[in-house]
Amino acid sequence: MDKQQSAIELQKIDCNCNNCKHLDRDIERFKKSLEFHYKLQLDEFEKRKKKLSNVVDAFYKSQEFDKGITAENQLNKMKFQFDKKSATINYGQCNRLGKAVSFIPDVLQLDTQKCFEHRST
């Protein structure tokens, strides 16, 4: 059994909607989820950056210039990077069950054991 066949057999055991032939993906709902998680992470980043900016100001006001310069250097190095791992939930429509579904790819789904059919069969 080659690597691809092994992966397919594992997918048949997992019964994840991601690999089911009855799934129609809901790209719009997934994009909304990505936008939501992006905004959450960006807001959190901006809060951390503002907090550090206040620390820099406090150091300069108290004339602790060495600490102020160090903190300002850290502030200037801060760059926002979106981590897509937080938005791993995928969405779709199950044509077999006639309902909306959500799932995390490559995670075992016990509730789909009876309806799952691999997309390659």
Image: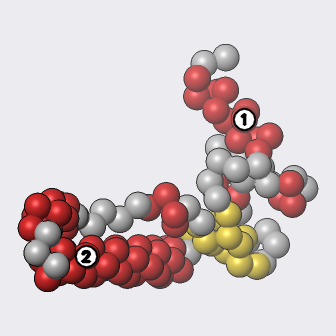
The image's mark for residue 2 is: none
Q: Does residue 3 show up?
A: yes
Task: Tell me what residue is drawn at x 71 percent, y 72 percent.
Answer: 101
First of labels 2, 1 by sequence position:
1
Q: Nearer the viewer, residue 21 or 9?
A: 9
Element at badge 2?
helix
Task: Tell me what residue is drawn at x 79 percent, y 68 percent.
Answer: 96
Q: Dot 2, crowdedness within 10 Å: few (<14), some or many (≥20)? A: some
Residue wearing tag 1:
10
**For this view, does 82 lie left or right of residue 67?**
right
Of the residues shown, which amino acid type is indicated by label 2? Val
How many marks the image carries: the answer is 2
Task: Tell me what residue is drawn at x 30 percent, y 63 percent.
Answer: 81
Colour setup of the view: secondary structure
Q: Nearer the viewer, residue 25 or 102?
A: 102
Q: Does residue 121 show up?
A: no
Residue 104's spot in the image, x, y percent? Answer: 64, 59
